[in-house]
Image (cartoon, grey):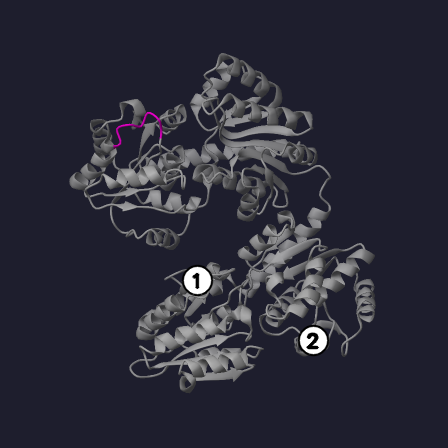
């Protein structure tokens, strides 16, 4: 059953009618509208089962109507859309045993921007109602992040992007204009402060000063109309601007538009971009909400930061001057929208979300996983481990709840969509362990004393607590050691032997150490680092990552991924090796910091000594970007273990500079001898390894990659067995 306010317009109305029609094909569905208007009228014309109220009913009458419809239809799920519907749904939840969810179409705190009375009344009522929903559906990943930031449970928030029916979309590109023909910049949106149409006007005015062919079309109504008309006159573009008013034939409108624009300060996932994409119209939009999931800079359109009319106007001029570029971007946007944001995909995802909600409502009291690791510190390798473990465990059970122990719980919750708490909050750790079925010591090298004995003791304590509170325990694709203190070796051996049910390790050295310290009771398996099976990014996405760093993606490169370390004193030898790779092999050196900002300073120092043309990366990248970028290298020279792992997963040969036994073990386990102990690092040693590895080429790289991927699957298989017991 769908609850709708009834007065829905624009993208909200389109969404409700589209999803209702599609869902009704395979489900019994009733649309309940609390006001008879365009929404219920069009729904009846579609043949939907509709119940509505004529006129504006008092709240008590509306609630009685909602209860009567629920009792008659007996739905499995009530799905609310909009503030008014949410309030009725929340009160229904108090009176009936039912599953209630709501789609969050926009930022609840900005829904009534510029209308303080409505913001205080309607806005607060909506936020109260949302807190009482069983589940929420965000129409963009950024909207989910906003909800998590505001304290909503990540486990109860789904992300389902808006979709459109592209089955009847025109197959041919939009006819392009040439010469002196006018180029129309169009925006279809409500004329209110959130849409920031003032920035559209300013950007077009700046662009018009340089290209008199430009025209501006503003379609929509709203409270900002008079203000915008005054601005258009002030900026001297009233003769080339048309206020179209309310548009009923959206397709015909975008047929007349050459460049579709949007300047919103806040968005979830706007339908106007999909509606423009339907007719192959290129787009420029603000970099907010879910827009970047559709508009990829320079690939499917252009982005600008909210309020930045200068960059916005530059994008307009670029597209206005180049018909072929307009066609290329319009076609790329059409393909992406039709493939990834179709109505069929949206309905399929929504149905699966309903099934998931109902399964979660029947979840056993004790279920789910607590994950403990070095998470939330900004280390790319550790964050990749977390993502990999979550991916693999979700494949075992997509409805599984997770609690992640993190140094940055809010960041972890937003990024991974999981419950998270501060790693040293023992009270929350105990509460989560009492609810969970499995405790995962999640990858990385936690059982070691090179950092400190205190760190070792804490991680051993978490294993003891998990076991005592009834969890099964797995050490998941982890590294062990070094353990320099004899007392630490004895203590670690005793705890691991007494608490772990299964230990999977990522390198043979860790397996040997476990046996040396007396661990024999748990099942122990040599696997691989969890990150090797992370899904790769597309070629376009990797190219975009290079572009963000100002690096050409089609040149031959050698990467250096180094870190600061007390015995890393001969830094000049790395710079000399980079120059040598350029002079001898024509490889452009690229310096990549793997833990930002910790590695940023040393990366810049090393690059500053290089004489050859080179590039320095400055930002933290996603796991997929690192793997894709390193996989493009002819050779990767790395100290950071995960730089070597990601490069190998991407198919690139590596030279390891070992500051820790985990680097030695990895290089040995992939069947390579391309290893230089840090204390032996010199230009001659690097030169010799570069020559040797490049002489071998990429032979055997694919076989090594596949072998690692097969070994890594043992981690998830072991966890799945413990969860099924």
**Crowd band around label 2 with a 10 angstrom C-alpha radius: few (<14), some (14–19), many (20+):** many
Q: Which residues are magenta?
A: 565-571
- Spot the residue most to the bottom: 239
Q: Is residue 630 left or right of residue 107?
A: left
Of 121 and 577, which appears nearest the observer? 121
Dot placed on the residue nearer the N-terminal end, 2 or 1: 2
* Position of 306 relative to 529 (above/below): below
Of 720 and 158, which appears nearest the observer? 158
Judging by the rendered image, the residue that carries numbered circle 2 is 40
Instruction: Tell me which corner region of the image, top left, top right, bottom left or bottom right, holds residue 579.
Output: top left
| Residue 568 among those drawn in magenta | yes
Judging by the rendered image, the residue that carries numbered circle 1 is 305
* Position of 530 relative to 315 (above/below): above
Of 229 and 374, which appears nearest the observer? 229
Residue 563 percent across, percent down from the top left: 35, 34
Position of the C terminus, as image quadrant, is top right
Indicate the secondary structure of the residue bearing disc 2.
helix
């Amino acid at each position: 059953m769908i609850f709708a306010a009834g007065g829905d317009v624009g993208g909200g109305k389109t969404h409700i009618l589209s999803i209702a029609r599609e869902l009704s094909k395979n489900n019994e569905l009733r649309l309940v509208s609390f006001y008879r208007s365009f929404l219920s009228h069009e729904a009846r014309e579609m043949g939907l089962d509709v119940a509505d109220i004529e006129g504006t009913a008092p709240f008590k009458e509306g609630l009685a109507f909602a209860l009567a419809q629920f009792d008659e239809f007996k739905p499995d799920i009530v799905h609310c859309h909009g503030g008014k519907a949410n309030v009725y749904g929340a009160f229904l939840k108090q009176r009936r045993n039912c599953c209630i969810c709501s789609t969050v179409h926009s930022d609840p705190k900005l829904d009534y921007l510029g209308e303080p009375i409505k913001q205080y009344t309607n806005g607060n009522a909506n936020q109260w109602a949302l807190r009482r929903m069983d589940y929420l559906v965000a129409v963009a990943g950024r909207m989910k992040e906003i909800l998590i930031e505001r304290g909503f449970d990540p486990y109860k928030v789904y992300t389902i992007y808006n979709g459109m029916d592209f089955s009847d979309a025109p197959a041919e590109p939009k006819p392009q204009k040439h010469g002196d023909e006018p180029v129309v910049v169009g925006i279809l949106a409500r004329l209110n402060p959130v849409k920031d149409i003032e920035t559209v006007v300013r950007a077009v005015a700046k662009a018009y000063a340089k290209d008199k062919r430009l025209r501006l079309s503003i379609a929509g109504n709203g409270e900002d109309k008079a203000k915008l008309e005054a601005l258009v006159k002030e900026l001297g573009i009233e003769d080339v601007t048309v206020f179209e008013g309310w548009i009923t034939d959206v397709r015909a409108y975008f047929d007349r538009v050459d460049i579709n624009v949007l300047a919103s300060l806040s968005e979830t996932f706007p339908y106007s971009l999909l509606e423009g994409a339907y007719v192959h119209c290129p787009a420029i939009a603000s970099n907010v909400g879910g827009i970047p999931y559709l508009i990829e800079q320079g690939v499917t359109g252009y982005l600008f930061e909210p309020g930045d009319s200068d960059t916005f106007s530059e994008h307009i001029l670029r597209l206005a001057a180049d018909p072929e570029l307009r066609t290329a971007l319009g076609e790329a946007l059409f393909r992406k929208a039709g493939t990834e944001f179709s109505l069929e995909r949206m309905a399929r995802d929504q149905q699966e979300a309903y099934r998931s909600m109902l399964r979660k409502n029947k979840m056993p009291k004790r279920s789910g996983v607590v994950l403990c690791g070095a998470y939330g510190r900004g280390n790319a390798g550790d964050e990749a481990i977390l993502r990999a473990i979550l991916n693999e465990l979700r494949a075992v059970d997509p409805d599984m709840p997770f609690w992640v122990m993190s140094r940055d719980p809010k960041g972890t919750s937003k990024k991974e969509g999981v419950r998270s708490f501060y790693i040293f909050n023992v009270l929350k750790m105990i509460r989560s362990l009492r609810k969970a079925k499995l405790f995962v010591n999640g990858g990385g090298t936690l059982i070691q004393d090179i950092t400190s004995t205190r760190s070792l003791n804490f991680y051993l304590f978490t294993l003891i607590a998990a076991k005592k509170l009834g969890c099964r325990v797995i050490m998941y694709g982890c590294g062990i050691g070094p353990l320099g203190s004899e007392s630490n070796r004895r203590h670690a051996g005793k705890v691991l032997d007494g608490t772990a049910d299964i230990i999977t390790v990522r390198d043979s050295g860790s397996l040997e150490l476990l046996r040396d310290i007396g661990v024999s009771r748990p099942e122990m398996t040599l696997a691989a680092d969890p990150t090797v099976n992370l899904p790769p990014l597309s070629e376009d996405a990797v190219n975009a990552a290079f572009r963000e760093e100002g690096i050409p993606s089609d040149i031959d490169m050698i990467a250096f991924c180094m870190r600061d370390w007390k015995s890393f004193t001969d830094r000049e030898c790395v710079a000399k090796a980079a120059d040598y790779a350029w002079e001898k092999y024509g490889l452009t050196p690229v310096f990549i910091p793997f833990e930002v900002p910790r590695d940023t300073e040393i990366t810049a120092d090393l690059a500053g000594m290089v004489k050859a043309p080179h590039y320095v990366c400055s930002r933290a990248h996603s796991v997929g970007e690192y793997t894709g970028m390193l996989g493009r290298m002819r050779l990767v020279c790395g100290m950071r273990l995960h730089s070597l792992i990601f490069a190998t997963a991407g198919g690139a040969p590596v030279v390891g500079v070992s500051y820790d036994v985990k680097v030695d073990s990895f290089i040995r386990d992939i069947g390579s001898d391309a290893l230089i102990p840090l204390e032996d690092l010199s230009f001659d040693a690097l030169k010799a390894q570069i020559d040797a590895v490049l002489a071998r080429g990429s032979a055997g790289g694919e076989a090594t990659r596949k072998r690692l991927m097969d070994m890594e699957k043992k981690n998830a298989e072991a966890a799945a067995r413990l969860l099924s017991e």
